[in-house]
Image (cartoon, rainbow, N blue to C red):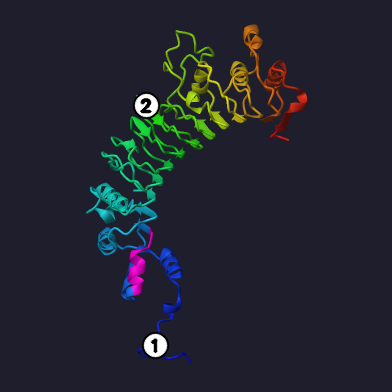
Amino acid sequence: MPKKVVSGDKDRFDDLPDDLLRRILYFLPGDDAMQTCVLATRWREIWRRTTHLCFVYDGWSFPTCERFHQLVKLIIQLRGNSPLTYCQINPFTDDVENCTRFARTRFTRTEQLMEYVLECQVEWLVVCPGDYLDKPLSLDDRLISRYLRTIKFEQVDFEGSSLDFSDCPALEELTMRSCNIFVCRIVSESLKHLRIIEFCFFPDDCRIQIYAPRLISLKLCSFYGFSGLTPLLEKMPLLETAFVTIADMCSDSCESNREDFNDPSCTCCDDKCVLLNGLSNAVHLKLTAKPGKFIYRWDLAWCPIFGKLKTLVLNDWFTAIDLVCILQHSPVLKKLTLKLDNTENFVGATISQKTLQQPIQCACLVVVEIQCLKVDQGVRKILKILSTCGILDKQTSIKEWLH
């Protein structure tokens, strides 16, 4: 028979440490966590000091948008500006019919929430407004925070906004996933890790510039790549790892399909190195592209020196001349991996004697790994080029995907 609770019985939660109660609140939805304030003064104070806060409208926890926004307003009033470690802002639904009162102002509310959490000295901020095609998230003024270390934007439209993070001196990580990045520049003196992933959109009529001199890692890729013109990377002297994919939706393409981009009649390119100059200090580099995308080959015409490069992964975008150029300008390269689906670029390829006479510094190269469908004429041509460059057969391994 269950014991009857009588007035004056001790609250069993009183024996639990504050850290455990905070852990309980961490797993509760926002409205349920707030309702613990009625249990006791201790619960209220612990809730007010919680450092993890989510403004997430999922259409399931809240029957209406109005109910959700009332809750948000109440949370802000009750907890004040208590410091935050983590905050996620995802307050809007795709079901506009159930949210007609807020459909036109929902991004404005996101901006207001961002202002609030910045006042709370948030360190890790996630912003995912949902339907990014409806109305741009306006960041007219630069974000200002001495505490913000990590930002993740997902499905955000930045058209007309500022992505200058100069007033966020502690910012180290920035992720933009499936965003419209219609800006002139991305600027941060402190940024260490930048990820632009899952099919982002860049302008078609101008190149955005990325200035992040303290960057350590860069990921500019997804299965579908990005849309628009390739961003121009400024110098990154501390860069260690980078993975860049140029896919079908990239607007950079050479109509004449030239192999010699020094030809003055070719007007497809800029008058400066776009990617590889910024990547030239990388230690580990992976460069992939769809056939016909020429931006890497254009950059190689500027002869960047990869003075720190130790591992390099390429797919089948390069030609014989490109491969020799890379080897000539990578003096400490230790491992080269070639992932080849199509080797048509190498069939019948020739390299001038002048090119081969230039010194190739491959003294540090230990292994060349070739991954291919099968050893065809193109693969044999690559092996011949490597041999001409002084790379021995015992340094080369071949993995056939069809076997």
| Residue 334 lies within the magenta run | no
Tell me how far mark 1 sits from mark 2, CA to CA.
70 Å
Residue 199, by quadrant, is: top left
- Residue 99 is at least partly visible in this image: yes
x, y percent for residue 15:
45, 78
Label annotation for residue 204: 2
- Tell me, yes or no, if residue 58 can be seen here: no
Query: What residue type is disc 1 on?
Result: Asp
SS at mark 1 in the image: loop
Asked if residue 368 lies left or right of residue 263, the reply is right
Q: Residues within 10 Å of mark 1 (few under 14, many from 20)?
A: few
- The residue under label 1 is 9
Task: Provide the secondary structure element on which disc 2 rests.
Answer: loop
Locate residue 48, reporting x and y percent: 33, 65
Magenta residue check for 44 = yes
Residue 122's place in the image compared with 359, above or below, is below
x and y percentages locating residue 92 in the rendered image: 32, 52
At 69% from the left and 20% from the top, the residue drawn is 386
Give the amino acid type for the residue marked by disc 2 in the picture: Asp
Is 358 left, or right, of 135 in this rendering?
right
Viewer-side label of 1, 2: 1
N-term mark: 1 or 2? 1
Q: Is residue 275 left or right of residue 361?
A: left
What span is in magenta? 42-52
Nearer to me, 63 or 38: 38
